[in-house]
Image (tube, rainbow, N blue to C red):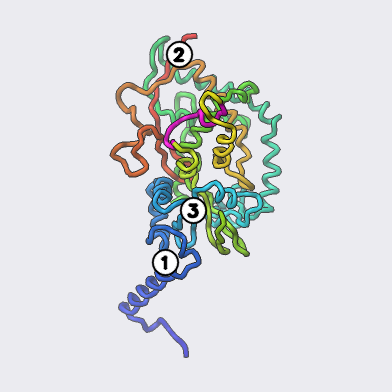
Amino acid sequence: MSYSFAGLTSGGWVTYSITVVIIMIIYNAFLHPLSKVPGPFFARVSGLPSWYSAMSGDRHIWLWQLFQIYGPKVRITPNTVVFCDPVAYRDIYSNKANGPKGPFYEAWQKDEYDVNTFSTREKKVHACRRKMLNQSFTEQSLLASQPFMVKHVDRWIELLLLGTQDGEWSEPMNFADLSDTLVFDIMGDLCFGTSFNIKEPGENPFRVIPHSVVQYMQFFYPLKPQLTGYTYLRACIDETMRLSPSGPSELPRQVLKGGTIINGDFYPEGTIVGASGWATGHNEGVYGDAEVFRPERWIPDEGTGVTQEEVNILRANFHPFAKGPGYCPGKNIAILELSITIARMLHRLEVRKPPTGENSLGEGNPNGGWGKRNKNIFQIQDSYISVRNGPMVQFKKRRV
């Protein structure tokens, strides 16, 4: 007996389509291997809620909300489970984890043959490329990069005061834009041997690069030696990366044949798993006052009552540069750049929010949605990378 769809009328096609959708909903909600994992009904039967939150730029907030409602693991699409738990993070991203990068990363490939270290899903290919890449991030390379960083930071500081007199505050400036120009100029010098000079005044065609990178991501996402000893400075950097991570959503991994165990639960082959960067950093079960900027939490000190054991627990949940095979090789150079920039800027300049005007750019709004109301939490847009706007700041030459 053979079947054919050729004779179906328009009404028949409608009936057939509705039947298929109903069957898929019933299967995904009640018969799917992940049916017991908690999550909102529409997310368990369809990927539309996840897609919509990504398009809105608030996917990190949406995930955080779900963890508040359903607990440390949530099913956000029929085949995806996201976690907010230190043990789960280790199980998903460790070197021994049975899950390479998910299909999501294929979007970054030019074609199936032209892959890069970031986009490749093959562990052996990734390991080979990382081995070559790591040679550029040795201690010797870091020492060699310092003069380039200092040169650009010092020039950047000069430009922040351009047009001001001693004792006079600068015009309000968007710090996100200012920092973008500095970062791209430093990276140009280190990677290509020449600066893009984006931070310099005047017309520059390269100035569109930071914004172009952001638009691209949005489209595809629907030491100086003495500085390393600055304990409090490093604690401030860590606390900032906790509250405002560069990667706010999960880094998806696809479970291979044989399945995997995550925090004691089995997940079958083909399941997409990950841990949310934003929600992990705002986990009250780990950090307690998770919404408070408190760098002292990272420093063992009898005076504040913070023990080394407590700091170790925080560190086990803190992965701003990822973990395992996907660990960012540029971590040390990023920390060095941040340390040099912050130390030299605050040594030479006073910084403040403008007393009037756009002085709330980047803040949470009391009238905003759940998870976006705290004015002391810097708000970001989730486009796989964090897209920042603000804060507005003013600078004045420090009297020394």
Residue segment shown in magenta: 289-301
Whole-Å distance between the Cαs marked 3 and 1? 17 Å
The first of marks 3 and 1 along the sequence is 1
Q: Which secondary structure lies at badge 2?
A: strand
Q: Is the residue marked by circle 1 packed among few (<14), some (14-19), or many (20+) residues within 10 Å? A: many
Residue at 50 percent across and 37 percent down: it is 242
**Residue type, numbered disc 1:** Ala
Q: Find residue 380 and report its horizontal and vertical position in percent.
A: 42, 39
Whether residue 312 appears in magenta in the rendering, the answer is no
- Can you identify the residue that label 3 sits on? 82
Q: Are marks 3 and 2 in contact (CB under 8 Å)?
A: no
Whether residue 297 appears in magenta in the rendering, the answer is yes
Whole-Å distance between the Cαs marked 3 and 2? 47 Å
The first of marks 3 and 2 along the sequence is 3
Residue at 43 percent across and 33 percent down: it is 292
Can residue 260 be seen here? The reply is yes
- Residue situated in front as seen by the camera: 138 or 65: 65
Q: Find residue 347 and report its horizontal and vertical position in percent.
A: 51, 16
**Residue type, numbered disc 2:** Lys
- Can you identify the residue that label 1 sits on? 29
- Can you identify the residue that label 2 sits on? 397
Q: Is residue 156 above or below residue 372?
A: above
Q: Is residue 256 above or below residue 363?
A: below
Residue at 42 percent across and 61 percent down: it is 44
Q: Are marks 2 and 1 in contact (CB under 8 Å)?
A: no
Q: Is the residue marked by circle 3 packed among few (<14), some (14-19), or many (20+) residues within 10 Å? A: many
Q: Which secondary structure lies at badge 1?
A: helix
The first of marks 2 and 1 along the sequence is 1
**Residue type, numbered disc 3:** Val
